[in-house]
């Protein structure tokens, strides 16, 4: 289970390293050969989609998503807990919908035989980054939702 605790960070780091290497290599190729790699921009864009979804999962795990604290600061601990639960339920539903419709999108891409513009690779390969990232985000939001439901705000306030 330890690997799952760090899987998003590992995948995000790999995405970022590959994106940086591809972009750097493309810039060097442009200056040295006056030509660029046609595939680098395409791969970098797809990796950015995956990186964004993984970033959502990482932020959920760390409870680092932006919130409207002006509302939660104005209410008591029980109401704050209810508002957090509502927010996490909404996040689970939203990322779950992205996961579901992402799978449908990938199935359509595969069925229609769509290919990427530059590399002419099957579009579903890169399209699968959406449901993969949404899966991680959904799992993390479910985890923080469960933690929030189990949390006792009155006990924390006394400590």
Image (cartoon, helix red, strand yellow):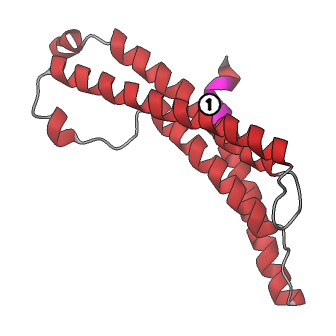
Which image quarter holds the N terminus?
A: top right
Residue 6 lies in the magenta stretch: yes
Circle 1 — which element? helix
Q: Is residue 128 visible?
A: no
In the figure, 88 relative to 43: above or below? Answer: above
Task: Determine which quarter of the picture holds residue 129.
Answer: top right
Q: Residue at x 32, y 22 (%)?
A: 85
Residue 112 picture location, percent across and down:
82, 47
In the figure, 70 relative to 22: above or below? Answer: above
Task: Determine which quarter of the picture holds residue 8.
Answer: top right
Residue 109 lies in the magenta stretch: no
Question: Does residue 32 appear left or right of residue 86 in this picture?
Answer: right
Q: Label 1 neighbourhood size at 10 Å, few (<14), some (14-19), many (20+)?
A: many
Question: Does residue 159 appear left or right of residue 25 in this picture?
Answer: left
Q: Residue at x 56, y 37 (%)?
A: 98
Which image quarter holds the C terminus?
A: top left
Q: Is residue 36 visible?
A: yes
Question: Does residue 157 appear left or right of residue 33 in this picture?
Answer: left
In the figure, 105 relative to 158: above or below? Answer: below
Q: Residue at x 73, y 55 (%)?
A: 17
Report the residue marked by disc 1.
135
Which residues, given as a range, are shown in magenta? 4-8
User: Total label count?
Assistant: 1
Question: Does residue 44 appear left or right of residue 83 in this picture?
Answer: right
Residue 70 picture location, percent across and down:
16, 42
Question: Secondary structure of the magenta portion, mostly?
Answer: helix
Extreme residue in the front direction: 112
- Residue 45 or 157: which is nearer the viewer? 45
In the figure, 5 relative to 153: above or below? Answer: below
Q: Residue at x 86, y 51 (%)?
A: 122
Residue 64 picture location, percent across and down:
40, 39
């Amino acid at each position: 289970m330890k690997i799952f605790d760090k899987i998003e960070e590992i995948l995000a780091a790999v995405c970022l390293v590959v994106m940086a290497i591809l972009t750097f290599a493309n810039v060097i190729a442009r200056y040295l050969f006056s030509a660029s790699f046609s595939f680098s921009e395409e791969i970098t864009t797809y990796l950015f989609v995956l990186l964004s979804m993984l970033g959502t999962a990482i932020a959920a795990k760390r409870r680092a998503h932006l919130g409207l604290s002006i509302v939660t600061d104005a209410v008591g601990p029980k109401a704050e807990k209810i508002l957090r639960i509502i927010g996490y339920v909404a996040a689970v539903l939203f990322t779950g919908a992205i996961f579901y419709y992402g799978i449908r999108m990938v199935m359509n891409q595969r069925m229609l035989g769509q290919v990427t513009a530059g590399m002419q690779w099957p579009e579903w390969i890169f399209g699968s980054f959406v449901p993969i990232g949404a899966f991680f985000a959904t799992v993390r939001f479910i985890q923080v939702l469960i933690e929030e439901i189990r949390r006792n705000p009155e006990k924390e306030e006394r400590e």
